[in-house]
Image: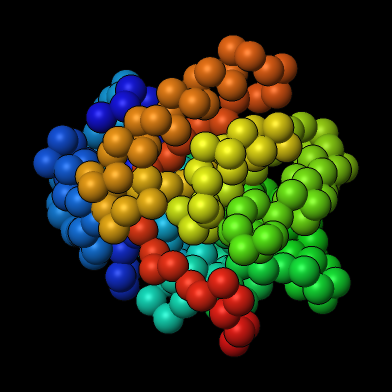
């Protein structure tokens, strides 16, 4: 395991408790879905941090009680692999987490306006994402998660103009609403790029602080060599450049779409 690694736990259905400890970490890294257990919360000093994708309040509360460092609020995990959650759900989770004086569990919100590909090159798509980002920040989100791709000369990579625009939009809304910085995470679309090292460098230059990846493999365990290489690359970039360091976060793999899959 990479010290400081954050394992993204994705579950089918309601999360009743968050698996913790080495055994659960290995099961998650191996790509298991629907992991459930009744285990006491892991100590916060653990070198591996867990993040759970949740789509209702009981799952979010169970993840927090199980020791999750962060929850990523989504909708349609089964049907679409995760879409933007409703403002009501974001408000409900943020309210419960912010009003209780227990140990802090961060709330990140997924911004994905539709299923299908990750090409957001229409004004309608971008406007919808802007509104969703603004609402999530107003409701108290601690982080924003999205991913935008673009195909150029037959090569799939990060959509730099759209990503930069949305990163700047997050910064503007965070300053307007809270007067503070809110981090941006580039989601599992990262595993679809043709050159992950180049994509990491570009995202670092844009100020994206985290990427979700399983090393472009079916599981993080299978992709561990790529993950380790990306972590080394991130460390090199943090030393060589003034931009914020981009952290590599282990997550679940999703199938590669066609270069231009129709939106649904």
The reply to whether residue 129 is in sight is yes
Which residue is rendered at x = 65% and y = 72% of the image? 113
Instruction: Please give left or right for residue 217 compared with residue 187 in the image.
Output: left
In the rendered image, residue 216, in percent from the top left (x then y), is placed at 38, 52
Instruction: Please give left or right for residue 40 compared with residue 141 in the image.
Output: left
Which residue is rendered at x = 68% and y = 61% of the image? 153
In the rendered image, residue 135, in percent from the top left (x then y), is placed at 75, 60
Of residues 201 and 123, the one drawn nearer to the viewer in this rendering: 201
In the rendered image, residue 57, in percent from the top left (x then y), is placed at 45, 63
Q: Quadrant of residue 83?
A: bottom right
Which residue is rendered at x = 31% and y = 27% of the image? 2
Q: Quadrant of the C terminus?
A: bottom right
In the rendered image, residue 250, in percent from the top left (x then y), is placed at 37, 43
Q: Residue furthest top?
A: 239
Q: Quadrant of the N terminus?
A: top left
- Residue 12, compared with residue 237, is above or below; it is below
Q: Residue furthest left?
A: 23
Of residues 167 and 260, the one drawn nearer to the viewer in this rendering: 260
């Amino acid at each position: 395991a990479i010290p400081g690694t954050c394992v993204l736990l994705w579950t089918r259905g309601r999360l009743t408790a968050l698996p913790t400890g080495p055994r659960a970490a290995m099961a998650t890294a191996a790509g298991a879905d629907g992991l459930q257990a009744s285990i006491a919360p892991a100590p916060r000093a653990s070198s591996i941090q867990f993040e759970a994708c949740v789509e209702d309040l009981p799952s979010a509360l169970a993840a927090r009680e199980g020791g999750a460092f962060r929850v990523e609020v989504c909708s349609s995990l089964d049907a679409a692999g995760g879409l933007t959650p409703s403002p009501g759900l974001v408000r409900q989770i943020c309210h419960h987490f912010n009003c209780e004086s227990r140990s802090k569990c961060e709330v990140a919100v997924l911004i994905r306006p539709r299923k299908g590909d990750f090409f957001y090159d229409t004004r309608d798509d971008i406007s919808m994402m802007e509104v969703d980002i603004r609402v999530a920040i107003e409701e108290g989100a601690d982080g924003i998660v999205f991913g935008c791709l673009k195909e150029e000369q037959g090569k799939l990579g990060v959509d730099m103009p759209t990503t930069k625009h949305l990163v700047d939009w997050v910064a503007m809304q965070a300053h307007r609403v809270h007067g503070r910085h809110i981090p941006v995470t580039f989601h599992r679309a990262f595993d679809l790029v043709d050159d992950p090292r180049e994509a990491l460098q570009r995202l670092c230059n844009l100020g994206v602080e985290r990427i979700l990846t399983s090393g472009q493999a079916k599981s993080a365990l299978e992709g561990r060599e790529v993950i380790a290489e990306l972590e080394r690359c991130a460390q090199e970039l943090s030393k060589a450049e003034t931009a914020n360091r981009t952290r590599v976060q282990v997550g679940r793999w999703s199938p590669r779409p066609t270069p231009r899959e129709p939106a649904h």
